Image (cartoon, rainbow, N blue to C red):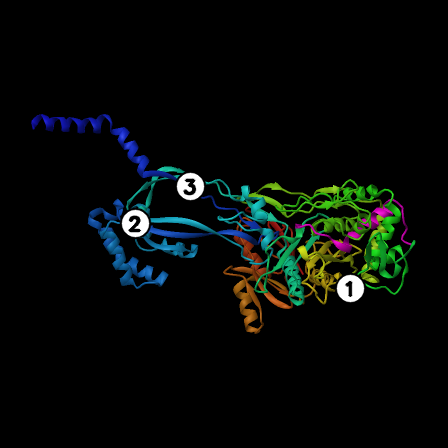
């Protein structure tokens, strides 16, 4: 027995002293592991600094009742703070009484629970208040409180540009900008060593962690006010006509910046949601494509605007197929300019056949020069490849050329069409459309996107002048004259109506795609806009002039009447104050609680989308006052336009800035543009109206 005991003791000493490190390492490998520390995903902002997509932190709170600091002196610290802590928890969460919290905490302490779940999904405000509670404020080592931080992606504006901004999803592929810039937004995850404890929980091992590198912020070109106008104008027509889906894009003429991009699709319950990005999906464009046809004819000097063409009563047979005009015309013998303004399919088909029947490749080369056979390269994944046939294509036939002349036998996206119209508005210079203005990290700009010229000239100046004349003519005496006849500004554009095939049923269901593309004001173009809407089968109203053009008019009317131009520039492109020198313009900014008190006192029916922010704006949308939040930080210049001097001085002096003021009234302009990174003791000049 003595020998046996000596052997056992010797073996124990050998295992502990000689093999100890090996067995401890094996134990650690079974009871420890590295877990990922998720980086904070970057925020997507609008041009004025409003959050379009951001990550909101949520907090899970646990208690380690085995913590040395909590159990020292037989748990004296725990007992001293138990009653006051239970009362504070009951008051904050209101899900249990103070007595119930006390019993639960005592039970966890007695069982020495190392991972006791206290509360889950706390907001930041709740978490901030919890940190000041008795016992909790002593710190993790003495209190045993463990915080687990999770985040949830949130689009504060809901429907507004939802598909374009995109979705960041853990169980499916991201879409929109969230997908295009995912590698920048998501940052780099860190890691932390944790040790397994009872009940399936893990405790962090101090000193063994790699901090995550947070994602970068994306500042878009989207203007939330213009987006709101475009979204509501499109939705209004979609509801009225029970349309299948539609898109509305607003682009800044001189730069190619996309200021608004709305995409609405009809859901099974009859409502509308941003389900697909129809703006970048190719389809047969219809009559808006006639601009490319006329450009080719004029550029090759095959026709003059004063030349005449016989519309054949709106019906013309080409081989075994028949070209038909969407609307009947009172005249058959018209000029080329009139044929374009009346949107005659017969007229454009005959002109194209007369000019290019012997050399159709010449016409196709013009389309390729206009980049219609290439994607725009906008900052969105999923842009469909356009299809522009050529004589070498297998599907080319004798009827392809005349049908291409008025927008069939070719597939291009609404954004491609708008890019062409924008070039005509921009004196022939074609700009690349883009959605991201810059990329920032911690307020510092890391990459700044600048306007990119695709083509310096899409045509010669004589052709350009004639095209601009024809587009204005459409809105004066052509198919859109009844829509824009009472406008207080000049409009230029083109209507389009295309018959759409419905799968195996072909064209039997009479489904039409209505469109309008143009720019305004025509004499000094600031914005270009396109609306493309797919109607329901056998819709009573389906022409581009009656479905799409009214949407563009509503967008243009509101932009022109509310002065939403570039800061410091008027309609003619001359320097001007954003706000007129009067007090009648319905646009205010300042403390949200103050503005809410005013509208409630005046008993005004208003829409509140301000959440819980302190600062915001009050403006009219669809003839109703709307309150919207404005994000204000100490490092970024806020949008002060529309504020009173009292509110502006409060913000700027809190940022330690030197302020110079000119005039009286509301703030009309500021020397430092909104969204600019600011520093202490910087000077700013405010112009009041």
* Residue 280 position (above or below residue 497): above
Is residue 619 highlighted in magenta? no
Q: Residue furthest front?
A: 320
Q: Quadrant of residue 121?
A: bottom left
Q: Nearer the viewer, mark 2 or mark 1?
A: 1
Q: Nearer the viewer, mark 3 or mark 2?
A: 3
- Looking at marks 3 and 1 on the same chain, the residue that comes earlier in the sequence is marked by 3
- Is residue 577 in view from this perspective? no
Other-residue count near label 2 (Cα within 10 Å), few / some / many at <14 / 14–19 / ≥20: many
Position in image of residue 365 (x %, y %) = 80, 41
- Looking at marks 2 and 1 on the same chain, the residue that comes earlier in the sequence is marked by 2
Q: Badges 3 and 1: C-beta atoms under 8 Å apart?
A: no
Other-residue count near label 3 (Cα within 10 Å), few / some / many at <14 / 14–19 / ≥20: some
Residue identified by numbered label 2: 143
User: Is 200 positioned to the left or the right of 435 in the image?
Assistant: left
User: Is 88 positioned to the left or the right of 353 in the image?
Assistant: left
User: Is 673 positioned to the left or the right of 139 in the image?
Assistant: right
Other-residue count near label 1 (Cα within 10 Å), few / some / many at <14 / 14–19 / ≥20: many
Is residue 304 highlighted in magenta? yes
Q: Residue at x 85, y 42 (%)?
A: 359
The tag on residue 36 is 3
Position in image of residue 170 (x %, y %) = 48, 48
Callout 1: SS: helix
Read off the magenta span.
280-306
Task: Tell me the quadrant of the picture where the N terminus can be found.
Answer: top left
Distance Cα–Cα, label 3 vs label 1: 59 Å
The tag on residue 484 is 1
């Amino acid at each position: 027995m003595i020998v046996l005991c000596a052997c056992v003791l010797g073996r124990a000493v050998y295992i502990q002293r000689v093999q100890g490190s090996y067995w401890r390492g094996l134990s650690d490998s079974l009871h420890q592991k590295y877990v990922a520390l998720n980086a904070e995903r970057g925020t997507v902002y609008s041009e004025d600094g409003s959050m379009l997509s951001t990550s909101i932190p949520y907090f899970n709170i646990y208690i380690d009742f085995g913590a040395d600091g909590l159990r020292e002196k037989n748990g004296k610290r725990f007992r001293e703070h138990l009653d006051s802590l239970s009362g504070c928890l009951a008051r904050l969460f209101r899900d249990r009484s103070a007595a119930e919290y006390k019993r639960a905490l005592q039970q966890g302490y007695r069982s020495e629970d190392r991972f006791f779940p206290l509360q889950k999904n706390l907001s930041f405000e709740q978490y901030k208040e919890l940190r000041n509670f008795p016992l909790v404020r002593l710190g993790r080592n003495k209190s045993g409180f463990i915080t687990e931080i999770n985040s949830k992606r949130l689009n504060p504006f809901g429907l507004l540009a939802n598909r374009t901004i995109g979705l960041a999803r853990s169980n499916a592929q991201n879409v929109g900008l969230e997908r295009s810039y995912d590698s920048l937004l998501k940052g780099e995850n860190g890691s932390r060593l944790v040790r397994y404890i009872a009940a399936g929980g893990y405790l962090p091992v101090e000193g063994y962690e790699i901090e995550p590198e947070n994602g970068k912020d994306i500042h878009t070109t989207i203007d939330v006010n213009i987006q709101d106008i475009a979204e509501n104008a499109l939705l209004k027509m979609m509801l009225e006509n029970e349309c299948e889906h539609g898109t509305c894009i607003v682009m800044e003429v001189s730069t190619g910046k996309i200021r608004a991009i709305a995409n609405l699709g009809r859901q099974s319950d009859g409502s509308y949601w941003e389900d697909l990005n129809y703006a970048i999906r190719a389809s047969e464009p219809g009559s808006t494509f006639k601009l490319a046809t006329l450009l080719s004819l004029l550029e090759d000097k095959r026709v003059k605007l004063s030349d005449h063409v016989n519309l054949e009563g709106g019906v013309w047979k080409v081989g075994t197929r028949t070209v038909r005009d969407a609307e009947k015309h009172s005249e058959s013998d018209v000029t080329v300019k009139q044929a374009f303004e009346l949107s005659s399919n017969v007229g454009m088909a005959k002109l194209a056949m007369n000019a290019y029947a012997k050399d159709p490749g010449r016409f196709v080369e013009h389309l390729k020069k206009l980049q219609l056979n290439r994607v725009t390269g906008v900052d969105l994944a999923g842009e469909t490849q356009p299809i522009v046939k050529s004589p070498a294509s297998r599907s080319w036939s004798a009827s392809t050329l005349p049908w291409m002349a008025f927008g069939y036998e070719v597939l291009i996206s609404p954004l491609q069409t708008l890019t062409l119209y924008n070039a005509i508005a921009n004196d022939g210079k074609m700009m690349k459309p883009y959605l991201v203005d810059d990329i920032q990290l911690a307020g510092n700009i890391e990459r700044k996107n600048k306007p990119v010229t695709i083509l310096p000239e899409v045509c010669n100046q004589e052709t350009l002048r004639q095209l601009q004349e024809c587009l204005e003519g459409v809105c004066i005496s052509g198919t859109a004259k009844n829509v824009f006849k009472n406008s207080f500004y000049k409009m230029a554009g083109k209507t389009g109506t295309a018959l759409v095939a419905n799968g195996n049923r072909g064209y039997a269901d009479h489904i039409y795609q209505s469109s309008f593309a143009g720019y305004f004001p025509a004499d000094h173009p600031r914005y270009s806009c396109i609306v493309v809407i797919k109607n329901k089968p056998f819709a009573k109203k389906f022409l581009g002039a009656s479905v799409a053009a009214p949407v563009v008019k509503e967008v243009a009317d509101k932009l022109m009447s509310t002065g939403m131009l570039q800061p410091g520039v008027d309609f003619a492109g001359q320097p001007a104050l954003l706000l007129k020198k009067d007090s009648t313009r319905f646009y205010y900014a300042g403390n949200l609680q103050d503005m809410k008190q005013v509208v409630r006192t005046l008993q005004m029916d208003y829409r509140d989308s301000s959440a819980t922010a302190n600062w915001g704006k009050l403006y009219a949308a669809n003839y109703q006052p709307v309150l919207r939040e404005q994000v204000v930080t100490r490092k970024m210049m806020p949008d002060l336009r529309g504020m009173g001097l009292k509110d502006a001085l409060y913000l700027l002096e809190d940022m330690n800035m030197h302020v110079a003021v000119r005039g009286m009234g509301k703030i009309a302009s500021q020397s430092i543009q909104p969204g600019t990174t600011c520093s202490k003791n910087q000077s700013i000049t405010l112009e009041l109206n």
